[in-house]
Structures are given as structure tokens and as C-alpha cells.
Image (cartoon, helix red, strand yellow):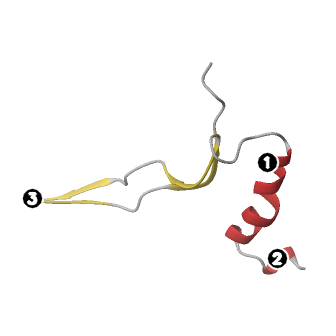
């Protein structure tokens, strides 16, 4: 398998997510994938207001709140 032929999503699901789970992170409570962390830039042109494209991250790992 040539890693250069894989998509970012394939690499994440085949290599990164299993490694994070093997390291002891809980996949259901601590790992989120494909998360939008902004709603997008607000663009104002006269009276017209729209939002730009939202920013996303591939994986987001959180530690439990003590």
C-alpha cells in the first residue's frame, strides 16, 4: 500500500485513529473527527451579509474534565 495514493481521510482512519486509541484515548468520549471550529467568516457587501466557508479539523482530542 502506497501512502501517497491515500486520501487524508484514509490515512486518518487507517493509521492515526488506531494509534490514538492504542495510546489509551477513549474513542467515544475523547476523540471527535471532522469537527467545524468556526462558522465561517462574515462577509458584508452593502446590505447583503453572508458567511464564508467554515474551518474544519480532521481530529480533535479532549482530556476528561476533572
Instruction: Specify whether 11 is left or right of 1.
Output: left
Residue at the outermost left position: 47
Which quadrant holds the N terminus? bottom right
Q: Nearer the viewer, mark 2 or mark 3?
A: 2
Q: Which mark is residue 45?
A: none
The residue at the point 62 percent across, 41 percent down is 29
**Alpha-carbon span between mark 3 and mark 1:** 49 Å
**Residue at horizontal 48%, vertical 55%?**
55
Q: Position of residue 35 (x, y in %)?
A: 53, 53
Q: CA distance from mark 2 to mark 3?
A: 46 Å
Most distant residue in the right direction = 1
* Up/down of 45 relative to 30, above or below: below
**What residue is disc 2 on?**
4
Q: Give the residue at x 85% y 47%.
A: 22
Side of 50 relative to 56 (left or right) = left
Label 3: which secondary element:
loop
| Residue on which the image places disc 3 | 47
Disc 1: which residue: 21
- Which residue occupies the foreground of this view, 3 or 22? 22
In this picture, is 36 found above or below 48? above
Q: Nearer the viewer, mark 1 or mark 2?
A: 1
Q: Quadrant of residue 62?
A: top right
Asked if the residues shown at circle 1 and circle 2 are in contact, with their CB atoms under 8 angstroms apart, the answer is no
Q: CA distance from mark 1 to mark 2?
A: 24 Å
Q: Earlier in the sequence, mark 3 or mark 1?
A: 1
- Is residue 28 shown left or right of residue 36? right
The residue depicted at 76 percent of the width and 55 percent of the height is 17
Amino acid at each position: 500500500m502506497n501512502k501517497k495514493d491515500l486520501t487524508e481521510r484514509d490515512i486518518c482512519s487507517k493509521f492515526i485513529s488506531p494509534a490514538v486509541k492504542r495510546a489509551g484515548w477513549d474513542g467515544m468520549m475523547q476523540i471527535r473527527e471532522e469537527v467545524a471550529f468556526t462558522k465561517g467568516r462574515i462577509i458584508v457587501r452593502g446590505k447583503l451579509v453572508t458567511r464564508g466557508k467554515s474551518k474544519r479539523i480532521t481530529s480533535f482530542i479532549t482530556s476528561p474534565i476533572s
